[in-house]
Amino acid sequence: MIERKKVTMEELLRDPNPLDTNVAVATKHGITRDTLFRKLKQELNAADTITVVDRDKEGKERVKKKKVPLWGTRQTARKDAHKLLGHYPSEKADFTVGGVIPVNIYTGRPPVQEPEQEEDE
């Protein structure tokens, strides 16, 4: 359920999204948009190093280190990237300013409206 909050016109003009107090708190603790995208890029390329012991025909052991992708981490990062870029359907918050002016705030992109198709007769 969406939390409703009354906002004055001055608050709305000063801060375009007064409902989003998490941004200020995150920025205060060093979590910025650049930080998130840098970490996201690292996660999109996440890999782990494993050690493989191989024996040749003469019975000698060879130790090899091999990088393998961490697919779970990469998939989660890909989903996060889509959310940050606004590719998922938006979420809508409705509230009124001063009890008079209705305001709709979309986070993400507004829903895509399909063009109407003419019916064949």
Image (cartoon, rainbow, N blue to C red):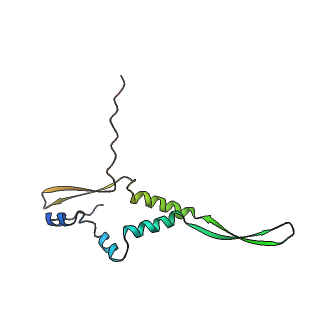
Q: Residue furthest top?
A: 121
Q: Quadrant of the N terminus?
A: bottom left
Examine the rendered structure and indicate whether residue 13 appears above or below residue 28.
above
Q: Position of residue 46 (x, y in %)?
A: 55, 66
Picture residue at 85% right of the left edge, 70% below the top: 59
Residue 52 in view in this figure: yes
Drawn side of residue 27 relative to residue 66, left or right: left
Residue 6 in view in this figure: no
Q: Quadrant of the C terminus?
A: top left
Drawn side of residue 70 relative to residue 29, left or right: right
Picture residue at 53% right of the left edge, 62% below the top: 74
Q: How many marks?
A: 0
Residue 9, image quadrant: bottom left
Residue 51, image quadrant: bottom right
Picture residue at 13% right of the left edge, 60% below the top: 99
Q: Position of residue 60 (x, y in %)?
A: 83, 72
Q: Nearer the viewer, residue 93 or 25?
A: 25
Q: Position of residue 73 (x, y in %)?
A: 53, 64
Q: Position of residue 94 (x, y in %)?
A: 23, 57
Q: Nearer the viewer, residue 103 or 109?
A: 109
Q: Residue furthest right?
A: 58
Q: Residue furthest bottom?
A: 29
